[in-house]
Image (cartoon, coloured by chain):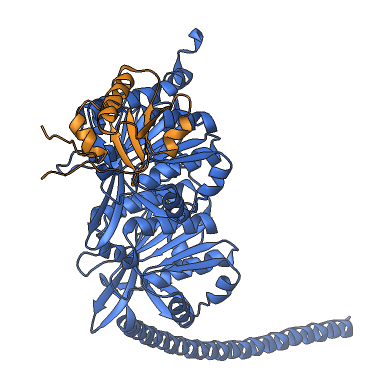
């Protein structure tokens, strides 16, 4: 079943929670950047939150694992944990189906 | 420091413990949980893990000035606060005072997608932040195993949990980690006991015969002594209470003070002084032998001395006991009104055994009685099996002895096995009074023996035990011709004896009268003889006088004749 990319008029608001510049955090960020460029070019905003600097946010945003990617917009909120190395799962998690299935 | 590596101080230095503050638990743990180390509390759903963890924090915050963090993986802070409010804990207040911090870790498997490597650093960050915020010394993680259902990468999870427990130790917080029991009788579903191995406490909630009993067991406590049995515990409006409350050792003091039994002749059977203060007394007997009467009469005597008596009635209501005792001339009502006598009456089946024990302890702590009466203990057998009842009473008696409270327990026995207690506690008792039906010649009478009484020379004789409007009396039964007679048999025998005695007395009287008569006769004869003798004597004297006069006359005549010749 083919489906076109769900085009949302709004900007996608993504947050990546990390704790310092760990290898996992760097991997996750570069993976995310790649996916966004490919699927959401020009329609996304990534905010990186370092919990070492804002520890209260771990509680406030119910973060359990790191790295965690949170899609705040569009609603509903989606959470993806891990280094985002499995692109397909990230797309499923973000509700972004790939244009060309493998 | 080096010079103190001996004796008790060394022990303390090597192994510091933090009292949990939970009633009874610290005694079993010989001081408390290992300070700065995690303790695993596991058990089935609904066994009280969360409450134990919360009470550990609340007691820490309120009694030991040790603030705590509660990290909940199952219930929200609001739910938790509400749930433990029923235990009398005002957690909201402690949160406001920054003594307790609740962090609810929420995650929903459906909302989370896993892609690749991750760690649980946020839990460390959250905990670390919370610990720093309130200066926490205690931490509870409830139930961290929930992570296994939310996250699928078990390898990561296990590595992270191992890291978390190590981190807790480094932080030096005393922690309770709860875990749910596995199906295959493993302590926890996901093998948490592999990581938390310093101290493991197992909670159990069993239903036997529709009555629930909660039990606690210390599975292991590395490097420390601990009680190894299963201990019943109770959750009520004052939190968790684990029994025994007091020590397990036989080191209670003994008293030489004596207490009157309330029955004069029974006192006489016990060296004339009665029971020892702080001793335990068992009154056993078949139905209708007067166990409650003996117990009430003791209570009556205690109150008369201005002492306090607590009466646990498991068979009759207080008003019924008061009414019944009036019929034997004993009015207990004034003592109740004066606050010296308190009845605590409940059906044995209303709660489980440990609840009974707890209620009894609580009432005792509240009332501080000198004497406790439990009437009857045999009814509690309907609640649980023999072994449990026995262990309950062992603990009860132990506690009471520690507090120098005299205990009287009544026990219903059955015909033929009077000298046995079903609950097997006779060996715990210092004094054992046996009430027995003596059946003979178509009637039943009550008999009373003192089967044993430690530390005193007690009577070995049977007494007939009589209940009348004048109260309780003990009388010596008729003993003669090698048999013991009681009741009307005794009465008849006594009547016969009286008649015989009377007859005998009459016989003696007759003999006496006869003798008297004989004496009178003899007296008369003696008098007659004497009179005869007197007569003869006076006759003789008259003759002698005449003789003398005749001689005198003759001499005068001779002189006269001489002068005439002269």
Query: Residue B403 location in percent, x, y?
Result: 49, 48
Name the residue nearer the viewer: B21 or A92: A92
Can residue A99 be seen in the rendering of this structure? yes
Work out which quarter of the rendered image holds the C terminus of chain B and state it.
Answer: bottom right
A52 displayed left or right of B419 = right
B80 displayed left or right of A97 = right
Which residue is most to the top? B2
Query: Residue B507 location in percent, x, y?
Result: 39, 87
Query: Residue B10 location in percent, x, y?
Result: 45, 17
Instruction: Determine which quarter of the picture holds residue B425.
Output: bottom left
Query: Residue A57 location in percent, x, y?
Result: 45, 34
Name the residue nearer the viewer: B505 or B324: B324
Please tell me which residue is depicted at 51% across the width and 77% down the height of the picture.
Answer: B330
B214 displayed left or right of B325 = left
B448 displayed left or right of B328 = left
Please tell me which residue is depicted at 26% across the width and 83% down the height of the picture.
Answer: B443
Name the residue nearer the viewer: B531 or B318: B318
Q: Is residue B47 above or below residue A19?
A: below
Q: What shade does chain B have? A: blue
Can residue B454 be seen in the rendering of this structure? no
Q: Is residue B30 above or below residue B380?
A: above
Please tell me which residue is depicted at 43% across the width and 37% down the height of the picture.
Answer: A59
Instruction: Determine which quarter of the picture holds residue B544.
Output: bottom right
């Amino acid at each position: 079943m083919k489906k076109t990319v769900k085009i949302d008029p709004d900007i996608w608001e993504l947050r990546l929670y990390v704790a310092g510049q760990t290898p996992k955090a760097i991997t996750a960020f570069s993976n995310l950047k790649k996916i966004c460029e490919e699927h959401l070019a020009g329609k996304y905003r990534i905010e990186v939150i370092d919990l070492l600097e804002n520890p209260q946010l771990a509680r406030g945003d119910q973060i359990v694992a790191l790295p965690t990617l949170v899609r705040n917009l569009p609603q509903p909120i989606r959470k993806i944990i891990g280094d985002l190395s499995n692109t397909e799962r990230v797309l499923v998690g973000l509700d972004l189906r790939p244009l060309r299935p493998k | 420091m080096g010079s103190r590596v001996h004796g008790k101080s060394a022990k303390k230095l090597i192994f510091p413990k933090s009292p949990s503050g939970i009633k009874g638990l610290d005694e079993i743990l010989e001081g408390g949980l290992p300070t700065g180390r995690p303790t695993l509390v596991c058990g089935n759903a609904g066994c009280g893990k969360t409450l134990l963890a919360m009470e550990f924090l609340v007691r820490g915050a309120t009694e030991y000035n040790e603030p705590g963090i509660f990290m909940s993986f199952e219930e929200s802070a609001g739910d938790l606060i509400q749930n433990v409010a029923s235990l009398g804990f005002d957690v909201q207040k402690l949160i406001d005072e920054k003594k307790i911090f609740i962090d609810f870790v929420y995650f929903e498997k459906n909302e989370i997608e896993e892609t690749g490597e991750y760690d649980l650093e946020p839990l460390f960050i959250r905990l670390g932040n919370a610990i720093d915020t309130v200066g926490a010394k205690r931490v509870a993680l409830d139930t961290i195993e929930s992570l296994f259902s939310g996250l699928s990468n078990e390898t990561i999870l296990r590595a992270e949990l191992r890291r978390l427990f190590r981190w807790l130790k480094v932080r030096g917080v005393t922690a309770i980690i709860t875990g749910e029991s596995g199906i295959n009788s493993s302590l926890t579903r996901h093998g948490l006991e592999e990581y938390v191995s310093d101290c493991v406490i197992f909670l159990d909630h069993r239903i036997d015969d529709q009555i629930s009993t909660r039990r606690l067991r210390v599975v292991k406590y590395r490097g420390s002594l601990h009680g190894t049995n299963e201990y019943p515990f109770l959750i009520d409006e004052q939190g968790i209470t684990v029994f025994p409350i007091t020590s397990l050792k036989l080191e209670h003091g003994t008293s030489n003070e004596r207490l009157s039994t309330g029955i004069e002749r029974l006192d006489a059977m016990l060296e004339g002084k009665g029971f020892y203060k702080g001793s335990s007394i068992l009154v056993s007997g078949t139905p209708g032998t007067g166990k409650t009467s003996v117990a009430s009469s003791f209570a009556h005597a205690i109150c008369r001395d201005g002492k306090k008596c607590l009466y646990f009635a498991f068979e009759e209501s207080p008003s019924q006991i008061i009414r019944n005792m009036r019929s034997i001339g004993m009015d207990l009502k004034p003592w109740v009104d004066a606050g010296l006598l308190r009845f605590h009456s409940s059906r044995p089946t209303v709660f489980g055994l440990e609840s009974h024990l707890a209620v009894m302890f609580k009432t005792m702590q509240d009332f501080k009685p000198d004497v406790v009466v439990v009437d009857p203990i045999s009814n509690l057998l309907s609640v649980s099996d023999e072994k449990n009842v026995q262990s309950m009473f062992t603990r009860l008696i132990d506690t009471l002895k520690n507090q120098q409270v005299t205990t009287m327990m009544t026990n219903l026995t059955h015909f033929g096995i009077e000298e046995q207690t079903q609950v097997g506690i006779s060996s715990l008792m210092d004094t054992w009074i046996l009430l027995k039906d003596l059946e003979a010649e178509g009637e039943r009478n009550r008999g009373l023996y003192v089967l044993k009484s430690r530390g005193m020379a007690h009577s070995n004789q049977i007494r007939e035990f009589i209940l009348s409007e004048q109260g309780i009396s003990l009388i010596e039964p008729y003993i003669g011709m090698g048999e013991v007679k009681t009741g009307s048999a005794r009465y008849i025998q006594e009547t016969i004896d009286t008649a015989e005695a009377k007859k005998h007395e009459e016989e003696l009287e007759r003999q006496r009268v006869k003798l008297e008569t004989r004496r009178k006769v003899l007296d008369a004869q003696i008098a007659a003889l004497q009179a005869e003798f007197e007569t003869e004597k006076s006759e003789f004297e008259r003759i002698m006088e005449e003789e003398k006069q005749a001689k005198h006359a003759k001499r005068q005549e001779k002189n006269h004749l001489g002068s005439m010749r002269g």
